Amino acid sequence: DRTQSTAFMKKGDREKRVRSGTTTSVNMASANPLYYAAVPKPQLVTLDAKTAKESHIDTVMEIDSRFLDGIGSGCYPGYLGNDFKLFGKPALLYRKFTHDLLDQIAKNAKQAPKRASVLNGRDGAGKSAELLKAASVAASSGHIVIYAHSAVTWVNSSRPYAPQSGTNMFTQPELATELLRSVSLVSGNALARVPLGKEIALGKKKSLDATKTLTDLVNVGLQTPSLAHIVLENLLEVASTQTKVPVLLAIDEVNSLWCNTLYRDQSDNILPANRLRLINTMLPFFEGKQTLAKGWVLGASSYSDLRFMPKDLNKRLNPPAMIPLANAELSKDLVAFPPTELPFDVIPMGTISAIETWALMHFYHRTKVIASPITKAIAGKRWLAASGNPRRIFAGVTSYF
């Protein structure tokens, strides 16, 4: 809200500042009308399976509201929630990288690759934005989309957990239920197309016969949260082996699957992530132990909180540059080089181009984030100053906020 703020303190004219409780009331008669104007909401093309075209590259497009409603109000990855509020609507740049990523999703819809893929790049490179766009378009094209916008919330002790009797595992039924609800809302039609194909037992007294669909299975988890974990596990088992509908399993902050969590067991020992049942369900897909028949397993790394980026994984994702060794015999010794083997494929994300920067800044001007008209020369200077990093470009033009 640009008219009220708990932190707003205008320098100079004190008549514009009247404290009222915990907020600041502004005398609009003497306020700058440009600063307090409503956020413009420019008309944008909605990004979906039909509009994801090459002709829209370098165009800012609106994210499908049906998908955003499905994943939950405000469930945006990283900083995107604040960005969307500033823009007045959820909008992202449709890049050449985006177009190529969506092309790969379409190809994998016919036959899934044997290994998962992970988007990796510097903090602020746009990994979360690309994963969000990919999940939204996949949902609009009829995929079963299992999308988690923040795996860090699975491990940072912000959500309830409980020991699972008879095992050393811990359950998070609330998180599992939320994930099922998201799948149901985002992919309801796709779930209804897939029969279970076999009887599924869900506890001692609950089972579903082979004629039921994935919709019926998910509904059990939503109605009975205590069964959410077993429902999610069976959902992934059936969805991964069937060939009627492609599947996109997309997890942001995927590095959290291998970290030490902030949870503790009954003996006050730190819990590794693989002792959380929810994460243990996802791990096989990113470690190559379980694959999809049709679709793609796609993740995005995050460096915003290094507590949840294991050091070993960080080294493997970002190995140091290999310098040729003068000793030919020593250069043959593989032990002299850090291991880089990973159970998944890495899709590197570099910087954005100067043209993409101009498209972004032109959109910022349309939404009044930037008041001055944007020229390609101005955009080029900003691109150079930020080394082509989208987050740094955005931070540079909003540093006065």
Image (spheres, helix red, strand yellow):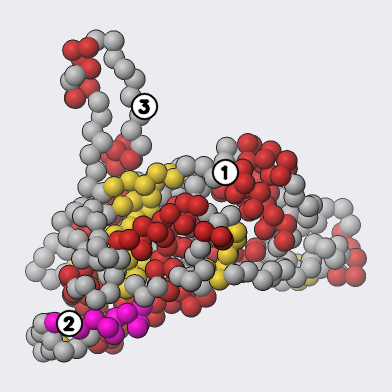
| Residue 320: % across, % down | 35, 29
Q: Which residue is label 3 attached to?
A: 321
Magenta residues? Answer: 187-197
**Residue 259 left/right relative to 393:** left
Which residue is at 21% across, 55% downward?
A: 114
Which residue is at 52% across, 54% downward?
A: 95
CA gap, disc 3 and disc 1: 24 Å
Q: Is residue 203 visible?
A: no
Q: Nearer the viewer, residue 88 or 291?
A: 291
CA gap, disc 2 and disc 1: 46 Å
Q: Residue 196 carries which label?
A: 2
Eye-nearest disc, 2 or 1: 1
* Image quadrant occupied by the N terminus: bottom right
Task: Give the SS element for disc 1.
Answer: loop
Eye-nearest disc, 3 or 1: 1
Q: Which residue lies furthest to the front in this view?
A: 55
| Residue 312: % across, % down | 27, 39
Q: Nearer the viewer, residue 339 or 277?
A: 339
Q: Which mark is residue 353?
A: 1
Residue 188 in the magenta stretch? The answer is yes
Q: Name above or below for residue 276 compared with residue 217.
A: above
CA gap, disc 3 and disc 2: 49 Å
| Residue 153: % across, % down | 37, 61
Earlier residue among tags 3 and 2? 2
Earlier residue among tags 3 and 1? 3
What amino acid is at disc 1?
Answer: Ser
Crowd around label 2: few <14 · some 14–19 · many ≥20 (10 Å)? many
